[in-house]
Image (tube, rainbow, N blue to C red):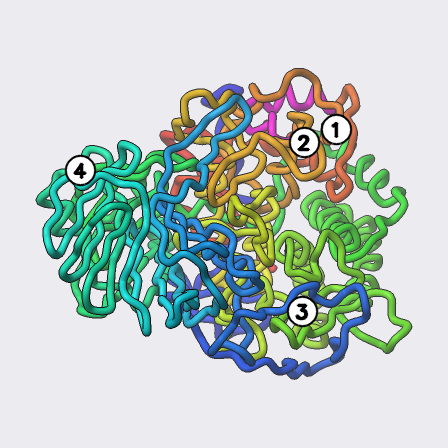
Amino acid sequence: MNPRRPAATAIAALIALTACTSSPGAAPPRDAGTVMEDAAASPLTSPAVTGSGSIAEKLPAGSTPTKAPAQAGELAGQAVPTNQWWSSALTGPRTQPLWTHPLAVRAAADGVQISGAPLTASANAVITPFVPALTVGTATGAVTVVSYGAFHVVLRVGLAGGGHVEITLAQGSPVVWLRFDGAAPTLNGTFRDVGSSPTRARLDIGGARWDVLGTDLAPTGNTVTGSGRQLAVARVPAGADRASWEKASTGDPIVRTTATMTYDAAAGTVRQTLTARRAGGGSGAWALLPHHRAGLAAGPLPLAGSYPDARGTMSLVTADAVRIDIPMPGLLTAMPKVPLSAEANKAVLADLNRDLADPPGKGGSYFGLKELGRLSTIAEVAAASGADTQRTAALNRLRPQLVDWLTHTGPNDGRYFGYDPVWGGLIAVPAEFGAQDYNDHHFQYGYLVRAAAVLAAADPTFAREYGDVVDLIVRDYAGSLAIGPASGLPPFRAFNAYLGSSAASGFAPFADGNNQESSGEAVAAWEAVARWGVVRDNAEMTAYGITHYALEAETARTYWLGEGLTREAGYAHTTAGIVWDAKIDFATWFDPKPESVLGIQLLPLTAGAFHRGPSATRQKDLPGKPTVWGDLFAADLALSDPRAARRRLDEGVPREESTSRAMVRYWIEALAVLGPPQPKAPAPIGSLAFGPADAPRILHAPER
């Protein structure tokens, strides 16, 4: 690519970023406000629906959750979050390891175990093993979830000798807090005392330093005991300065965690603020992941030491809140009109006709909704190309399918959404890939929400008639706080504020914690929320979508695609196929081929998929010509070399189910004209910077 090729002149006016007081389809305010993740009560009750859409009050057999929140405790009767790092604590029995970064805790049959083991690395995986260092009790009984916040949870675990222990776990905290009731504060383990005091037991456990904080501590034999009711357990970081570490590692427990995000269009940034309030106030030690460190705003005091983590080495600070600034990577809310050559336009038109000649995709909550995404993409490319006949044909096919999903007509209906009164959520029927257990809701439902935004932009009556159900679907996977107060749905579901990314497993029944495979579908889910917020003229929802899109895109580039990240020595790849709480895998759930590992990060191909950087480094993970999803790899190649991508496409490539041929062609030809996208250049929603990095030009999506 010639870096001096000028970007195309903006084709259409910038979406007006003014207060949302105009007709449906108006864009959000320039600074769309602050959005929050926080705990919120939401009684289990089927949400009311207005307009022409409807949901089922009862789900059929096979589409109901296979587990109940049996350990919800005081949260019983409330819609509770799924898809969290602590979700296994709700379903039982007891818990899987709960990974806080840098620690992990498991309520097991023989005690509450605390681990902080080093990594192991191989060519295809980086793993954090769970190795108990200290254990509370010799056996445990019932587990209940007492409370939770944006990135903490409190568990109550019964002890065999009577009484119980309440355990406070917070992500990013190197300290676990234990409060005993009806039982003596006791920890068991194999350790060597290396200079304890009555308020801090200093232990060597297998060559690693651990501290236990409490009152009248007595480490003897294999047991640490104390008086009072509380203990705190801390893993001492490598390279710690003793005085500053012991000041920062406090026995004062965290009692509330919140996360707020604010979009600053002028600066082109999203600021996330993670706040932890402690029982006694004040600050404490935080462990930061690489994306935190890269965007860290002034305020926290550096703290010597580090921890290993599968995502990358963690550094430390002392603070009561951590603020990070990340680039808003530009978000086109429609495919822009780019002046292509006559030959390229002819090729796009031919591919549009081929797309429309394809048999319609079939399936349930995943493949059926991917077909909606395909049709909406065809319509968008046709609009950008001036192919009115093809656009009308695509929209005419899209509308009845969307209406079918958004209405429930009775027991013989084949496709619809129903309310689950067990957990509090919407289940698409028929459910695929465990969606009845809240697996993959953001992956799946994001296709529908984006398709609804495309149709509503062309036909505002659709939003008026069926928008209420689409709003509920957004709230199901984005969190009920995305639009006003909670009502029958949990305050958050897929997204994890501390990790900056979503998780796909509803109940997290794995020793390695929760996980996410398709970072591309996760980013697209937030794109869909922002685009639906725009056509709904809803500033709050749009802000929710923009801010989460930016953070999900940042962590997708970092942890899945490996941009700017130093992987653990021994891992042989740039990319990761699945990122877990405790490990990264060069693998997928469905196919071991390298093109599948990378390809699942590249779909769907939409107007919002320009957040990825140049492709040359990640495509080195491919052993040769891809045997699946060649269209996705051609489009990805165009981010670095559109001419090579055009040649590959002209030779013929296999197609991914949700991907429009015309979109791939238009994407490649547009990048040949515009130059590479510059996702870190400030650009308000509805626009994106293209061209040379030192002098990019802003391209705007067409006005609606």
Q: Which residue is mark 1?
A: 628
Q: Amino acid at mark 3?
A: Leu
User: Whole-Å distance between the Cαs marked 4 and 1?
Assistant: 48 Å
Position of 635 with respect to 649 (left or right) is left
**Do the CB atoms of the residues marked 2 and 1 lie less than 8 Å apart?**
yes
Does 118 sit above or below residue 178?
above
User: Whole-Å distance between the Cαs marked 1 and 3?
Assistant: 33 Å
Q: Residue at x 75, y 37 (%)?
A: 656
Q: Position of residue 566 (x, y in %)?
A: 39, 27
Position of 480 with respect to 262 (left or right) is right
**Do the CB atoms of the residues marked 4 and 1 lie less than 8 Å apart?**
no
Q: Which mark is residue 240?
A: 4
Mark nearer the viewer, 3 or 4: 4
Q: Which residue is mark 2?
A: 596
Q: Amino acid at mark 2?
A: Ser
Instruction: Examine the image and state in which quarter residue 185 appears.
Output: bottom left
Q: Position of residue 536 (x, y in %)?
A: 58, 69
Element on which disc 1 rests: loop
Q: Earlier in the sequence, mark 4 or mark 1?
A: 4
Mark nearer the viewer, 1 or 3: 3
Mark nearer the viewer, 2 or 4: 4
Q: Residues within 10 Å of mark 3 (few under 14, many from 20)?
A: many
Q: Which is more toward the observer, 587 or 189?
A: 189
Q: Amino acid at mark 4?
A: Ala
Specify the quadrant that holds the C terminus.
Answer: bottom right
User: Whole-Å distance between the Cαs marked 3 and 2?
Assistant: 29 Å
The segment highlighted magenta reads: 635-649
Q: Which is more toward the observer, 456 or 82?
A: 82
Does 635 sit above or below residue 37?
above
Q: Is residue 460 visible?
A: yes
